[in-house]
Structure formats: C-alpha cells, structure tokens
Image (cartoon, rainbow, N blue to C red):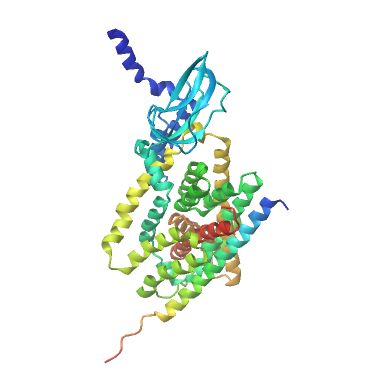
Amino acid sequence: MTVGETFLKALEGLTVGFQMMTPQNVVILIVGIVLIYLAIKKGFEPLLLIPIGFGAILANIPAAHMMDKDVSVVCVETGKLETLDVKVGQVVGVDQTLCRVNVGGVVKDVKASEAGKVIKIISAKPGDQVNVGAEVVLVEKDYRKWGLLRVFHETGISTEVFPCLIFVGIGAMTDFGPLLARPVLLLFGAAGQFGIFLTLLLALSMGFSKLHSVAIGVIGACDGPTAIFVTSRYAPELLAAVSIAAYSYMSMVPILQPPVMRLLTSKKERAIKMTSTGTAVPQAVKIVFPIVVTLVTCLIAPIGAPLMGMLMLGNFLRESGVVGRLVAASQNEIANVVTLLLGLSIGATMDGNVFLTTTTLIIFGLGLIAILLDTAAGVMFGKLMMVLTRGKVNPLIGAAGISAFPMSARVVQAEGQRENPQNFLLMHAMGANTGGQIGSVMAAAVMLSALKTMGVA
Amino acid sequence: MDEKYVFGLTLTVVGMGTTFISIGLLILLTEILKKVLAAKPAKKE
C-alpha cells in the first residue's frame, strides 16, 4: 500500500459519521437544539430539557455508538445459507463461526465481530438465499462494551432507579404544611387525576394496545418520574415520547391551564375569596404523616411502593429534623446528579430512525389532551366543592390538583388575583398541589396494581 | 362491548374509585392525627 493509499484509508474512517447520517438523525439533531433553545431562552424546565436535548444530539451522531447494546452480524457476500451454527441464548466469542454461506460453491464462514450472547436469529433457515449486507444474527454485547448512554439507561431507567431517586429529592423539597392545615384539599389531588383515565380511554379508542394506552394516559399524571416509572415497565418503546411529552407539558402548565380555567368558570366564581387557611399543624403530625401515607397507600397498592415509599422517605427525612445532611443531599446532590443522568438517558432514546413516527406525534397530542382534561376535571370538582360549601371554595383551586408543583399553584394564584386583587389563593392552591403529588402517585400505583390482578401486566 | 373498552372502563372506575377512597382515608387519619398530636398547652406552675 502506498503512502497516498494509507493516507486516504485513514481519512476514510473520519468520514464514517457523515456517511451514515440519515435524514431522521438530522431532524432529531435539530429537535435536540430546539429543546436546548427552549430551555435557555424560554426557561422551559431547563434542568431536564438541556440534558434531554444534549442526549438526543449524542444519540443521533452515527457511529458514535453511544446507545449501543447489541450488534448485528451481516453477510459480506451473497449466497445460500448453508448452516446456522448458533442458537438463541448461546454465548459466542470473537471470530466464532455463526453460520456458513455457500458462495458459488465455496462455503464461507460468517464470524462474530464481538463477544456476547445471541439474542435473535434474524436470517431465514438453511437453504435460503441471503444477500450481501443481510443481517444474520443479533448478538448482545458484553455490558462492558455498551455505549456510555446505554449504560446510564440500563442502570437507571430500565431498573426504575432514577425516577425513584428523583422522588426522594422531591419529597425532601416538599412542604406538606398547607395541605395538613386543610387535609380536605387532598380531594383535589384525587380529582386532578381524571385526565389519566380519560386519556387512557381515548388511546384505547384510537387503537393503541392496553399497555401502551396505560403509558400514554400516565402523561396526565403531570408527573415526570411516575410517567417514566410506568412507561419503562410496560411500554419501554414509548419511553422517549411519553417522558418528553410529560416534561414538556409540565413546563407549559402556565400556558395550558388558564384558558381551560377561564372557560369553565365565571368571573364571579374566580373572584371568590377563601379565608380559612385551616388549623395549626403540630410538628409531630408532619413527622407522622409520611409514615401514615406510606402505610395506607402501599398496603392498598403495593406495586406503587417504590414511588410512594421514596417520596415519603424524602419528606420524612425533611420533617424528622435530625438528618440535615441527608435532606441537603436529597435536595441537591442526589436530585441534581440523577436529573442529569435521567435527562441524558431519556434524550438518548430519541434515535431518529425509530422516534420519528406518527405514533410519536399522536402521543404528543394525547398528552396535551390529558393535561387539559386534568385541569377541566379539577375545576369541575372545584365547582362541586363550591356548591357543597355554599361558595366558600374558589373552583380555580381544583386546577392545582395536579402534580406540576409549584407552577400549577402559582397559576391559580395569578388567575384568582386577575379577577380580585385582594384574593390570596396561594396557600390553598399549594395544599391542593402537594395533594396532586400524592394523588398522581396513588392513581398510578392503583392502576399498576389493578393491571397485575387483571392479568394484563 | 369491545373487550378493550371493558378493560378501560374497569380500570377507570377501579382507579379513580380506589384513589378517592385512599385519599378519603388519608384525610380522616390526618384529622385524627391532628387531634391526637395537637400541641398541649404548657402546665402552669
């Protein structure tokens, strides 16, 4: 080989990324940049959208293999498949013969390029014609050879560890004081979950499978970690679409909720002042509350224990008052590190070649409907409470019964003050909003438990 | 009725019903806790 040829060969390797780039990859690269732009310029959930956007960019750089887990062995020449020498589940080494192909009377070996476990025989049976480039066998590589983002994804998302750790942080950051002052506000947290089930029914009517419909409905929980937990368990192929829809719409709560709130209430109703802020809450109640919630909810819906248990653990650390270092770590180090890895892992699932489908667009549409239905159901429940209490409850409070904390409570406060500048609904809305956090996890946990007993999952 | 809709409606009724019952139970227990654990006034010497 001449110096020139060697030089050209070396340069060839540097153009592989460009050669393998597909239009779908380009679209997702642009989407990743748009997500980052929205996070920086518009302030849309920057803690999540920046890692998600960057993860999407990294995962769509061809030949970078950031999400690699398995490798398909392809035929290098056209011929007739002579023998298949491996079975699914068999562990193979580098250069081990996987099959033999008869090329014009000469039998040639097709060998494994990576060590690992055979997880799929792609090609047809012996005797079939196989063309050059045809995939024959899929080999799952040894985990030490996985792409970096794949390692994050498998260890944190597939195992459901990341959403649970995020909940420790959320629990440590949440003050249930306003809710405990008026425990009846918890009812709004239950009413705000109607959107989950209405969207589930809508997804079923549109032809989605049962488990896919459940995952899509959970966007209505307005709760990113819960959506990830449920989807990674029952519909991992929808994880990117569901989690991005959940987080995007959560960040858009200040835009999405007000029109629904105004549509369903009159000016007079929105101007209702809520005076009573409830009774004083002894510290002992704040300490015991997370234990009671854990016991009650986990006994009713045990499958939701990882979520509710971690949420209440974080809150118990906070209220116990004796583990300041653990509270600080949960609120900062744990929440920050996991948020970064969680965002990267979700973004990494946005492989343009599988993400860009009409299904993704439909999921985004249904997710939007879910949030709007949550708000509508919450406000209607607020109106019911208004009637039952003879006008002592402002129906806007119902809109805060979702898990998007504290955005939703702030929206209620702003809308109330628009009609009556003397109106201070924030503490009531905060109570309903923290109730929404409990309600969303509870609804998801009940759904998971019911799915199990119904034999669907 | 289509089996899918039976599934969806069952999940909706069971899901929302159980969520409301659990929340109701939590409200009740919280009110009891507030009464039982209410801060007692300091005794006068």
Name, please, the residue furthest toward the bottom: B45
Q: In this view of the protein, can residue A40 be seen by the observer? A: no
Instruction: Reply above or below: A414 against A71.
Output: below
Q: Residue at x 52, y 68 (%)?
A: B23
x then y, percent, for residue A258: 53, 52
Instruction: Reply above or below: A202 against A301.
Output: above
Number of marks: 0
Instruction: Reply above or below: A446 against A357.
Output: below
x then y, percent, for residue A164: 41, 55
x then y, percent, for residue B28: 50, 75
Q: In this view of the protein, can residue A126 be seen by the observer? A: yes
Q: Nearer the viewer, residue A214 or A390?
A: A214
Query: Can you tell which quarter of the image residue A283 is in?
Result: bottom left
Q: Residue at x 44, y 54 (%)?
A: A407
Query: Can you tell which quarter of the image residue A67 is in?
Result: top left
In screen coordinates, is A359 left or right of A86?
Answer: right
Q: Nearer the viewer, residue A214 or A421?
A: A214
Task: Identify the image quadrant of the N terminus of chain A.
Answer: top left
x then y, percent, for residue A75: 48, 22
Name, please, the residue furthest toward the right: B1
